[in-house]
Amino acid sequence: MSSSSKWIETAVDQMSSLPGIGRKTALRLVLDLLRRSNDEVERFSSSFQLMKQHVQFCSNCHNLSDDKLCGICSNDRRDKQTVCVVADIRDVMAVEGTSQFHGLYHVLCGLISPMDGIGPSDLTVQSLIERCERDHVTEIIFAFNATMEGETTAFYISKKLQALPIEITSIARGIAVGAELEYTDEITLGRSLQQRVPYGKANH
């Protein structure tokens, strides 16, 4: 699929570099932008530039934020002694969508995966441990995908926290093995949070 314009080709190349966007979809989006006014295209492009310039990682939980602390960590109505540990920022959005959790989060920015060369030092595990000690956290909830990487990560962190007086729980396995949190419906995920069990019993 080629265009008569090198500028359209360049735009399609950039658009199709996004995950899940094939060249046909990219071309359709580019042609739609081409039909819009200059002001609309300017607002569209500047929104991404501003996002890149201003969005940062929360210094406490590593969630995305416009400020040093994200809106969840800075909310005095949240339970600061209960921390839900997730692999990815999208998992925070999934759990928040259930409206069933009122504590804080900790984003690991991945899961331990020796096959992919990802170890604990590549994640924010040490930051979590320091947080638990500093903020007197009383409960840690593992909300990981039901995969080998998720189980490996939970096991490693539980060992690191075993000397601290912290209750370690895991979301109930109403979520199918191999399923990803971000694609789980809100009712199932919400029930899994409400029915969480002590870590170690989650798979029995």
Image (cartoon, rainbow, N blue to C red):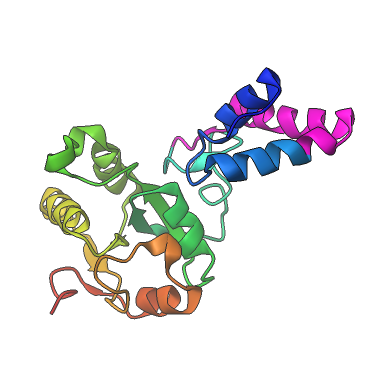
Q: Is residue 29 left or right of residue 143?
A: right
Seen as rendered, the residue at the extreme top is 6
Which SS type dominates the magenta stretch?
helix
Comparing 78 with 123, the one in front is 123
Comparing 79 with 118, the one in front is 118
Vertical order, 2 against 128 (above or below): above
Residue 57 covered by magenta stretch: yes
Comparing 118 with 78, the one in front is 118
| Quadrant location of the N terminus in the rendered image | top right
Visible in this render: residue 128? yes
Residue sitting at 65 percent across and 38 percent down?
27
Residue 129 covered by magenta stretch: no
Q: Report x, y in % for residue 124.
A: 29, 38
Residue sitting at 61 percent across and 36 percent down?
66
Q: Is residue 62 left or right of residue 148?
A: right
The image quarter containing residue 61 is top left
Q: Report x, y in % for residue 115.
A: 13, 41
Tell me where the magenta segment starts and ends, as one range: 33-59
